[in-house]
């Protein structure tokens, strides 16, 4: 069978594959604990459901403008004003089928083959593949100091004449690290000076811990004209726990949004009307669900850190936000894919290998689930990995015996 050169370079999504694996095992009655997911378990905001139900009851669910319905664009404009202190016009906004599509369409709009896109590591698993889908080259940058916090000089070192864009995701998936205000200010200034696109993936920007507040990239932009190459990506999936609604958006200069809209129009014809109205309800509705989710995630983070502290040799920094922690398990195995498979096979705990995020030896653990999931999941992992653990473990009525060293 003949497939394209680009298709040959694209791997499957590790996170989606793990979700599928966990679902299949659960369907077979296996006692799986999913510590690999990026999906909050809280309910969809009632305002989103009521707004969507209103359209559903009308039985008038039709095509939408490729860049989003006016009501959603107005809600995004309000959101941008409230959280970014930035007044934009409808022509600066495009709604998409999730923040992922907004990023993908943006990359398709700006990249030529062999151009380069820089992003700090660890990085979201899709960034390299999205860049490669455009025929371009991903350039991950691993912080030299061993932390999850990049420095401007490390970005500067890899910029070439082929560099077209920088992607910044803060707070970060998978590490939960929130980059410093100094770094955000410096990267905005640097990209403006070098004429580079700066794509701010702010999908987790309200899910912060320990009193942290979102950092507004627009505060450091000197060019606020329609020549600005600053692109802000956001959506309803994470903060409103509306992952299955697949609504995200991009805010950028009008020309770029026009080109992105043209591309999206030929891809999907625009997002679903029903799901856009649900997003309108969430953005314009009561916001207490966001704070409730944030508090739950912060508490879950604390529980996760406490239980990981029981491991000898595990290195992990408390996440500043999101619903992940990125722990160094290399003392138990340098091959994170092998280690993740071992934990799934032996104790039915799903984790995501660090190599998928550009850092081998790590595992991404999610705090989206219940306290019980976190507690029992980490206890199972410790039993499987710690040679000083008891020889037997009960999972429900099933007795497991350690037959490995």
Image (tube, helix red, strand yellow):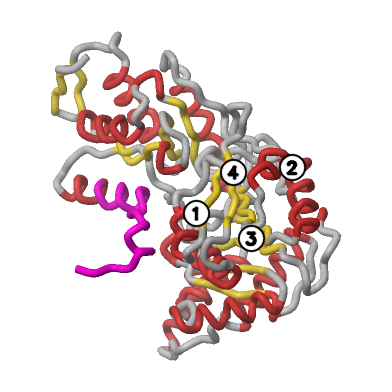
Label located before the other in sequence (4 or 1): 4
Task: Tell me the number on the disc at residue 183.
Answer: 2
Instruction: Report the disc number at residue 402.
Output: none
Q: Which residue is the site of mark 1?
A: 127
Marks 4/2: CA distance?
12 Å
Give the alpha-carbon distance from disc 4 to disc 1, as whole Å.
10 Å
**Residues at marks 3 and 1, CA–CA distance in whole angstroms:** 14 Å
Tell me which corner region of the image, top left, top right, bottom left or bottom right, holds residue 349.
top left
- Mark 3 is surrounded, within 10 Å at the Cα level, by few (under 14), some (14 to 19) or many (20 or more) other residues, namely many
Magenta region, residue range? 1-21
Q: Is residue 19 above or below residue 266?
A: above
Mark 2 closeness class: few <14, some 14–19, many ≥20 residues within 10 Å: some
- The residue that mark 4 highlights is 120
The residue tagged with tag 3: helix, strand or loop? strand
Q: Residues within 10 Å of mark 1 (few under 14, many from 20)?
A: many
Q: Look at 49% across and 67% down and name the residue there.
A: 101
Spatial separation of the CA atoms under disc 3 and disc 4: 15 Å
Q: Are marks 4 and 1 in contact (CB under 8 Å)?
A: no
Distance between the alpha carbons at the discs numbered 1 and 2: 20 Å
Mark 3 or 2: in front is: 3
Residue at the location (45% across, 49% down)?
A: 125
* SS assignment at label 2: helix
Alpha carbon distance from label 3 to label 2: 19 Å
Which mark, by number, is residue 164?
3
In the rendered structure, which disc, 4 or 2, sits on the residue that comes first in sequence? 4
- The quarter of the rendered structure image containing the N terminus is bottom left
Residue drawn where x is 52% and y is 45% of the image: 123
Q: Position of residue 354 (x, y in %)?
A: 42, 36
């Amino acid at each position: 069978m003949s497939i394209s050169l680009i298709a040959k370079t694209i791997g499957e999504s590790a996170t989606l594959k793990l979700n599928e694996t966990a679902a299949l095992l659960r369907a077979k009655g296996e006692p799986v604990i999913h510590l690999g997911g990026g999906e909050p378990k809280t309910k969809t905001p009632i305002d989103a459901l009521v707004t969507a139900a209103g359209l559903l009851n009308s039985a008038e669910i039709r095509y939408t403008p490729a860049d989003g319905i006016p009501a959603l664009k107005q809600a995004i404009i309000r959101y941008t004003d409230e959280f970014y202190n930035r007044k934009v016009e409808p022509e600066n906004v495009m709604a998409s089928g999730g923040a992922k599509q907004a990023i993908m369409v943006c990359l398709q709009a700006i990249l030529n083959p062999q151009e380069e896109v820089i992003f700090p590591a660890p990085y979201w698993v899709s960034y390299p593949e999205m860049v490669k889908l455009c025929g371009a080259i991903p350039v991950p940058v691993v912080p030299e100091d061993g932390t999850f916090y990049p420095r401007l000089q490390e970005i500067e070192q890899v910029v070439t004449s082929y560099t077209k864009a920088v992607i910044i995701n803060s707070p970060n998936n998978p590490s939960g690290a929130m980059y410093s205000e100094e770094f955000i200010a410096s990267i905005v200034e640097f990209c403006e000076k070098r004429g580079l696109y700066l794509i701010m993936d702010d999908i987790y920007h309200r899910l912060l811990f320990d009193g942290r507040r979102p950092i507004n990239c627009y505060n450091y932009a000197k060019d606020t004209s329609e020549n600005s190459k600053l692109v802000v990506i956001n959506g309803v999936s994470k903060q409103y726990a509306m992952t299955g609604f697949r609504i995200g958006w991009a805010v950028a200069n009008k020309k770029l949004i026009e080109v992105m809209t043209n591309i999206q129009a030929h891809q999907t014809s625009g997002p679903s009307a029903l799901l856009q109205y649900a997003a309108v309800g969430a953005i314009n509705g009561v916001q207490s669900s966001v704070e409730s989710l944030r508090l739950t995630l912060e508490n879950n983070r604390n529980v996760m850190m406490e239980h990981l502290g029981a491991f000898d040799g595990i290195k992990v920094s408390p996440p500043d936000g999101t619903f992940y922690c990125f722990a160094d398990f290399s003392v138990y195995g340098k091959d994170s894919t092998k280690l993740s498979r071992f934990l799934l096979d032996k104790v039915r705990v799903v984790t995501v290998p660090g190599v998928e995020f550009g850092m081998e030896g790590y595992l991404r653990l999610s705090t989206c689930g219940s306290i019980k999931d976190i507690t029992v999941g980490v206890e199972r992992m410790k039993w499987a990995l710690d040679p000083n653990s008891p020889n037997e473990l009960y999972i429900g009525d099933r007795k497991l015996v350690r037959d490995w060293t």
